[in-house]
Amino acid sequence: MLSCLGHRPSRLRAGENIRSLMRETRLAKEDLIMPLFFKEGARSERIPSMPGIEKMGADLMLKEIESLDNAGIKAVLLFGAHGRKDGGASAAFDEDSTFHKAIRRIKDNSDIVVIADVCVCAYTDHGHCGILRPQGRKAAKPQVRIDNGKTLDVLAKIALSYAACGADMVAPSAMADGQVRAIREALDCGKFSQTAIMSYSAKYASAFYGPFRDIYDSSPVSGDRRSYQMDTGNGREALREAALDIEEGADIVMVKPALAALDVIKAVKEEFGMPVAAYSVSGEYSMVKAAAEKGWLDEEASALEILTSIKRAGADIIITYWAKEAASWIGSRR
Ligand code: PBG
């Protein structure tokens, strides 16, 4: 018998207006955070592995922030590098550093939300995200061993120093155990109870951070980051990491990278209902850029598809190198 009933999902896709009416997820420029890279000196410096992204001195950074503000971007994630690298990352928490002064100037001149990344890898001579324990001489295969306690002390000092300069939020990215608690305690004791913490909670040991490490020459001199960053095969562990950070006082939990961890973003959002940030990392950006330069991909369409999928997975906030461009793309789409 012939049935007259037909399932036709395509009815709701017939034209742009009905597609727009039915769209479940809409990317907004207000969702996006732009990472900015500080450098000493007046000049900017291109980053070859990240076309379109530059390291900037304070003056240029202020101008860039004004232009981001005009584009409708609400927050920036600042990365610093200054002073000499050493084993203890001592330059990182020097409140008189050029980077700290730049944070103060930004806060004096702009209402944009300033988030400061808290890690030591740009300040350690070995390039790891923690203070290392001395290696036993006999180790046949030397392992990267982080001194967690010393690392927490340094991370807390760095966070406090950024809060003292007026940063609205700190974002610990070292994957040290207990880093959120150590920072929350230091901030509260230092009378910075209003400074928020966005924790890199589920941070995978990802190959997609490759271009980023060129920026501050922060690739580990030896070994890799797999003894403190998470294994790609693990999903449940991400929930345990996020649960710990929430208990320790994180205001926002982050999953990183975004594109290779969409399932994790979704799981974290569903499990905790906390504000979830996702970091669309350097490799996600650069691979699209490189393909677009060759004419193999449409950058705008690809970037917006990636960012929308990250939001669809459950991210409330997306840290992305496309933030400024995406704001204008979103604005000009019908
Ligand atoms: C530093 C840090 C990294 C990134 C953000 N903070 C590098 C790393 O952990 O190796 C990666 C960002 C990106 O790739 O865009 N701890």
Image (cartoon, rainbow, N blue to C red):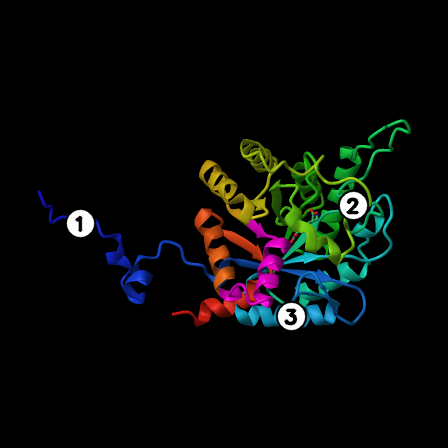
Residue 323 falls inside the magenta stretch: no
In this image, 29 relative to 143: left or right? left
Label 3: which residue? 64
1 or 3: tag closer to the N-terminus: 1
**Which corner quadrant holds the C terminus?**
bottom left
Q: Dot 2: few (<14), some (14–19), or many (≥20) neighbours within 10 Å?
A: some
Residue 82 placement (x, y as % from top left): 81, 58
Within 8 Å: ligand 1 and the Cβ of disc 2? Answer: no
SS at mark 1? loop
Tell me whether the residue at label 3 lies in contact with that at label 2, contact meaning CB atoms closer than 8 angstroms. Answer: no
Identify the image quadrant of residue 216. bottom right
Quarter of the N terminus within the rendering: top left
Task: Say what amino acid the circle numbered 1 marks.
Answer: Gly
Q: Of the residues tagged 2 and 1, which is closer to the observer?
A: 1
Q: Is 293 in the magenta? A: yes
Q: In terms of depth relative to the viewer, which is nearer, 136 or 301?
A: 301
- Chief secondary structure of the magenta span? helix
- Earlier in the chain: of badge 3 and badge 2, it is 3
Closer to the chain start, of discs 2 and 1, is: 1
Does residue 162 sit above or below 71 in this rendering?
above
Q: Nearer the viewer, residue 293 or 156?
A: 293
Q: Which residue is mark 1?
A: 6
Q: CA distance from mark 1 to mark 3?
A: 54 Å
To which residue does mark 2 refer?
A: 220
Q: Are marks 1 and 3 in contact (CB under 8 Å)?
A: no
Q: Amino acid at mark 3?
A: Glu
Q: Which segment did they paint magenta?
A: 278-300
